[in-house]
Each structure stands twice: as structure tokens, then as C-alpha cells.
Amino acid sequence: MDLAADCVVLSAILFGLGVVGFVFKRNIITIFMSIELMLNAVNLAFVAFSRQWHDLSGQVFVFFVIVVAAAEAAVGMAIIVLIARNRHSLNVERVNLLKL
Amino acid sequence: MTPALADAYSLAPVITACGFGILIIVGDAFLPRGGKSLLARIGVVGALASLAAVTLASRHTDDAYSGLIRTDAFSLFLESLIFVITVLVMLGSYDYLVREGLPLGEYHALLLFAASGMAVMASANELLTAFVGLEISSIASYVLAGYRRTASKSNESALKYFLLGSFATAFFLYGAAMVYGATGTTRLDVLREMFVAGRAPGPLMLLGCAMILVGLGFKAAVAPFQVWTPDVYEGAPTPVTALFASGPKAAAFALLVRILVTGFGAANATWFWAIWVSAVLTMFIGNLAALTQNNVKRMLAYSSIAHAGYLLVALAARSEIGIAALLYYLVVYALVTLGAFTIITHLGEPGERRLEIDAYAGLGTRQPFTAFCMTIFLLSLLGLPITAGFLGKFYIFDSALKAQLPGLAVMLAMNSVIGAYYYLRLVRVMYFTEPEQEWTPEPVTAGVGAVMFLTAVAALGFGLFPGPLMTFATISAQSFR
């Protein structure tokens, strides 16, 4: 297997770990980190495919993902801070005023 | 026209909306405390200017920015709808914001940013642009959902929307990466040419398509990814819920149509069954869950899920009349839902206390105009003849039959009957039940009255004279030839 294929397999593993973390973790910060892990798996896959196709547009995509993820993190952390202030807890199971 | 100017023309509505949004934020810093209502006016003017800028965009209907953006009748149709929704949401939310003591500046700026993101989604011709548009609108929406900062329910709504929205975005992106890996491009028209040339979708491509569908399914709130919808809709401030149920849903469907029909249109066997199953699940889950709700916001949230199912039926028809029916229904549904949520905003009272169905008892005698408008909206959602909702359902039903999908058509009709129960229940409470405690609703203000009047006129007008809207929808559907 060449390097690009290895990287794609690694990115699939990272993405899977992110999904598992999102589903099973109970701390909001950890859940948020799992999402970041998934986004970085996406970046790795794009870079690997970009190398495989000898095409730069995949790497351009990565820059957009990084920038947008930063913007999303800013808003996300603000929401998490609000939750922590109003409820004094970061456990998602205690964020349950609205029935699911 | 120089190429740079031509490109700017096709993004004119987006540029206008963002420009006014920035103007509001800057203005907010300089205006004295008492003069903030000027910002709301700038917001409405900005949304109207963006709507006017759609005509500028129509002067250059072609690919722009090296194929990243595509302006055609379809994108113009949805941009018009999105900015009409923005204007109506702004008109309907001013009194609410004042009543709840929420800042006016950021609200209107965020609405304009969200609308600009939706407009980008409507004209995306490349998965990269689709992603950027999706995120511009989503990030603004996360903030809007949590706009009542001190209310725990609003916080919770924002958190759930943010976590599940980002999760969905990650799926969309991984799908885009897989499509890129399989083909070496993320441009939708290039993908289309590959399929037309006879290329069969390989496993990587199918995985990519499936993950993109999962991501967009979350955003459009279709089953089995609809779980977040009632919670987010219930917890968000009511005018923001009005926006969520109309704008982002329209934009998500626009993107779904764009990606499935332009990108994967020639390989539609790959996604047909996914859409079919999702349509059936969405219709039944939405309608059956709405039956047992006592909170009006939650009931309409489930109703919005059911309507997304009807839209999927039109998409499953995979034909031009199907897309035209989808667009017609999207307009009717968005305006009517917006009107209904505006009435809920109006009757909510400080702190959003009046949200139970029983709180609407006796509205028919205490505020006949409001009750009458609400009845029109509910009957249109139900799909009773004369209202636009009936014609919308009829067009979708017709397109499903013509596409040889009698099963879907029958289930659509069945679901309309189930829906009748909970819509008529609210009508009955408004007219034939007396409240346990005497109450007088607040008088209807100019903004709320205008939204109620305009959406009610639309619900009846498009029902009696569907011609112009249907013609525009048909022309838009032909953009995919």
C-alpha cells in the first residue's frame, strides 16, 4: 500500500473514533473534542486524496475546513460557557429540560 | 461587463446581506442606548435590499467564480424565498425582542448573515461552496437558538443544535472527501458529466453520497435524523423557531436537490431508495408524534418534520414536475409555518409562558382576526381545498403518480388525514372551548399584524391563483436540464 492509501485508512479510523466519542462520552467538552477529531480526519482524507490525484483543490478544501472549524469552535465554546454558568455542570445528561 | 463584475453580480444578494449585517454591528457600537430601534429598521431595509439584489443576480445567469457559484432560475427562486422569509421574520420579531429585553443589533445582523449563508447554499455548484454556505447559516443559527441567554431552555436548544449540527457537518465533509477521492473533483457539474458519460459509481462514491445524505438529512430534519428538531424548536426563541422551520429547511432542501439532481442525477438509482424510505419514515414519525403534543411549538415542530417528508416524496419522483411541485410546496409551507409561529410569538406573553394548546381557548371571540389567520394557516398545513397547501399536496401527489410511485402517493394521502386530527384540534380549542381563567391577548402590533396579513393572503392567494408561482417553479425546475 502506498502512503496515500495508508493516510485514508488512518483518517477513517480517526473519524470512527470521533463518532464513538460523540455517542458515548458524557462531558460536553469531550464531545466537542470528538467533533474536532472528525473534522481533522476529514482534513487528512482530503490531503491524502489530493496527493493521489496530484491536484491542489483538495488542499484548498482543507484550509476552508480549518477556518470554519475555528469559527465554529468560537461559537461552540461560548454556548458551553453559558451552559456551565447557568447549570454548574458539563454533563450532557443533566441538560435535559426539553424532553428528548 | 468585465468577468469580475459579472461574478459580483451573481453574488449581489449575498454581498448586500453581509454588507448590511456588518453595518448593523458597527452601528450598534456607536448608537446610544435609546436609539437601537434604528438597527431593526436597517435590518429590514437590508433584507429588502438583498431581495431587490436578486434581480441584479438575474442579469448574469451563468457559472461564476470559476464554477464555484451557479446562478440560474433555481437559485433565484430560492434566494427570493429566503429573503422574503428574512423580512417577515424581522417584522414579526421586533415586539418580541422589546418585550423580552433582548438586544436588537446582533439579532438583525445574525439574521442577515444566516440568510446570506442560505443564499450561498441555494447557488452552490461545488461541494466547497455548499459547505461554506451551510456553515455561515448554521453558525449564525446556533447563536440565534441561544439568544435568550439567561433562559436555560434556550441554552439547551443552542447546545443541542450546535453539537448535532457540527456532527452532521462532519459527516457531510467526510462524504465530500470520499467523493473527491473517487473522482478527483468536488464540482457538481463535472460529477454530472462523469455519470452522463457512463461511469458507474464505485464503493467510495456510494459511501460519499451516503454520508452527504446523512449530513444534509440532519440539516433538513428528515427521519431518521430528526430527533433534535422538537427540542431545538421548542427551546429557541419563538421568532427564531419561525426562521428555523422555514429558511434553513428551504436552503437544506435546495442543497439536497442541487447535489442529488445536478451531481448524482444521472445515477439516481443510487439514492432513490434512501429518499423513498426516508420520505415514508419522516411523514409517519412527524404526524404520529404530533398527535400527542400539548405544546404548540412542539406540535408545529413535529408538523414541520411531516412536511419535510412530503417534500421528499416530490424529490423521490425524480422528474421536473416533481421538483416544480417541491418548490411550490416549499414556498407555501415556509410562508404558512412562518405565519403560524408569528402568532405563537404574539400570544406567548413575557417569558414565553402561553405555549400550551389549552392556552388558545377562546381566542376566536377575544381576537377574531388572529384566530382567523391561525385557522387559515392550519387549514393550509392540513391541505384543505381553496388554500395553497391543498394545491401543493396535489402537485406532489400528481408527480408521485406520474413517476409510478403509487405507494408513496397513498401514504401521502394517509398522512394528510392523520395531520387533520391535530390541526383541527387547535382550531376547535380556539373557537369552541372557553378558557378556565379569563385573559385578554395583547393587541396585535403593526409588525405582527403585517406578517399575519401577508402570509394569510399568500396562503389563500397562491391557492386561488397558483399560475404565476407555479410558472416560476416550473422554469426553476428546468434549470437542471
Image (cartoon, grey):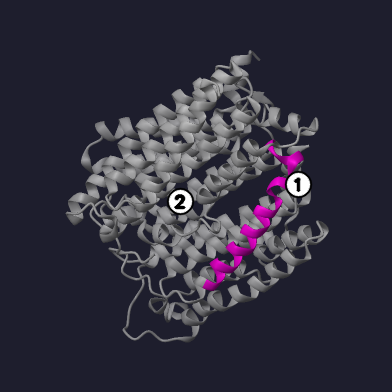
Disc 1: which residue: B474
The dot on residue B168 is: none
Q: Amino acid at mark 1?
A: Thr
A47 is within the stretch colored magenta: no
Task: Give residue B159's position: percent from left, percent from top.
Answer: 33, 50
Q: Amino acid at mark 2?
A: Val
Residue that carries the numbered disc 2 in the rendered image: B89
The residue closer to the viewer here, B224 or B256, is: B224
Numbered disc 1: secondary structure: helix
Kindly indicate the quadrant of the structure image that contains residue B166: top left
Q: Is residue A57 left or right of residue B229?
A: right
Mark 1 or mark 2: which comes first in sequence? Answer: 2
Mark 1 against mark 2, which lies toward the viewer? 1
Of residues B268 and B120, the one drawn nearer to the viewer in this rendering: B268
Q: Chain of mark 2?
A: B
Give the chain letter at badge 1: B
Examine the rendering and report whether any part of residue B15 can be seen. Answer: no
Question: Image height check: is B9 above or below B259?
Answer: above
- Image spot of residue B171 (x, y percent): 50, 42
